[in-house]
Image: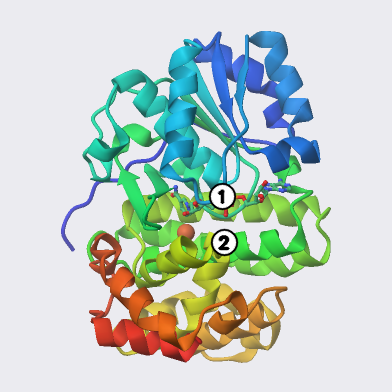
Amino acid sequence: MSGFTFDTPPRLVCEDGAALRLGALARELGMRRPLVVTDRGLLDAGVLAGPLDALGEAADVALFADVRADPPQDTVEAAAAMARDRGADGVIGLGGGSSLDTAKLAALLARSGESLADVFGVERARGPRLPLIQVPTTAGTGSEVTPIAIVTTPTHEKVGVVARVLHADVAVLDATLTVGLPARVTAMTAVDAMVHAIEAYTSRRRKNVLSDTLAVRALALLSRHLPRAVADGADLDARRALLQGAALAGMAFANAPVAAVHALAYPLGGHFGVPHGLSNALVLHQVLAFNLPAADRMYAELAPSLRATGSAAARPATGQALLDGLAELTAALPLERRLREVGVAADDLPMLARDAMQVQRLLVNNPRDVTYDDALAIYRAAL
Ligand SMILES: NC(=O)c1ccc[n+]([C@@H]2O[C@H](COP(=O)([O-])OP(=O)(O)OC[C@H]3O[C@@H](n4cnc5c(N)ncnc54)[C@H](O)[C@@H]3O)[C@@H](O)[C@H]2O)c1
Ligand SMILES: [Fe+2]
């Protein structure tokens, strides 16, 4: 195996109630006028009242609460402009992946003066950025520990900014913030995290011993605790395990990037507004079945992580066992199963396949080459 490098944020604060210490954490980074980046739904749900009060006692806080799911380019630019106009000396992302991604880019653009168009792609952002704290309220994207921000362009493409400068200074994992997450959002975000673990483990270019270790443990934590959190959202042990599993998966795929499941999921988000985790779930089985001839051994290595769940426990560890275990797990989730249930028609599939082929940044990591015809066949199977 060739050598590897591994990047991750320098500090993880992992404790129930840790978000109530945001004031002290912000001061440690020298923040006196932080910008908090979040979305209106979270604010209205009251999830952020405790953390915002605590922060308000320690600092002069400005609030950007206009984040929209799958953040459009102009939302990101508005957040950056607000950070600049208010003279913010730090940014705190507080929310799901959409808020955390917006926070990353606001911290970058407000300080470096780069424009968003200049930094799309891999390692094009130079920085510097403002100090950055990331506090997830979903257990899914792992954005708190990744150097990635995903933006939706005016032409409905989902494009990534990937650059080491986007790694947060501190990630705060406080499971109490995720207790009110509805069962459906819990399910879709956790599937996203499971896909991060699986695709990191099979990543063709940068898979390494550290990302493998994180991915295996992440998949075990996520698959064992997802059914519990869906059944009882207030199960704090399950919530904590999901949040930690999502972060471990995030650390893994930040260094061993994701592949065809994500590449085929993005056009569903861009064109049909399907939430990120659900769009992954809708093509997961078909992509893994396509990959199986090339990834059989790696899937077999992952299968035991799922075997603690349901009847999968009795199966031998083969590549197919991973697919069967995932099918069993996802069948019990409150999610749509077929593309047609989210408004996709047969006529749309060529356009989706064309768009998926544009996501070469991710397709190059897939264990099996994907052609346009392959992508079309995968979408057809998922319709
Ligand atoms: N940066 C990365 O590494 C990375 C990785 C994967 C996905 N993403 C991106 O992240 C975005 C998706 O993020 P997401 O799946 O976390 O969803 P999200 O941030 O879009 O939030 C989804 C919904 O859940 C609500 N919500 C969040 N936390 C809640 C809570 N605790 N209680 C009640 N409601 C809550 C929000 O208000 C919102 O309505 C997409 O844009 C995707 O492309 C980024
Ligand atoms: Fe994802």
| Relative vertical location of residue 114 with respect to residue 54 in this rendering, above or below | below
Residue drawn 42% across the image and 64% down it: 266
Disc 1, disc 2: CB below 8 Å?
yes
> The disc labelled 1 sits on which kind of residue?
Ala
Residue drawn 35% across the image and 27% down it: 109
Say left or right for 339 vs 214: right
| Relative vertical location of residue 287 with respect to residue 68 in this rendering, above or below | below
Q: Is the CB of mark 2 within 8 Å of ligand 1? A: yes
Helix or strand or loop: what does disc 1 sit on?
loop
Expressed as whole percent of the image width and height from the top left, the position of residue 143 reads 48, 45
> The disc labelled 2 sits on which kind of residue?
Pro
Neighbourhood count class around disc 2 (C-alpha, 10 Å): few under 14, some 14–19, many 20 upward: some
Query: What label does residue 69 carry, if any?
Result: 1
Q: Is the CB of mark 1 within 8 Å of ligand 1? A: yes
Residue that label 2 marks: 275
Please say whether residue 168 is visible from this viewpoint: no
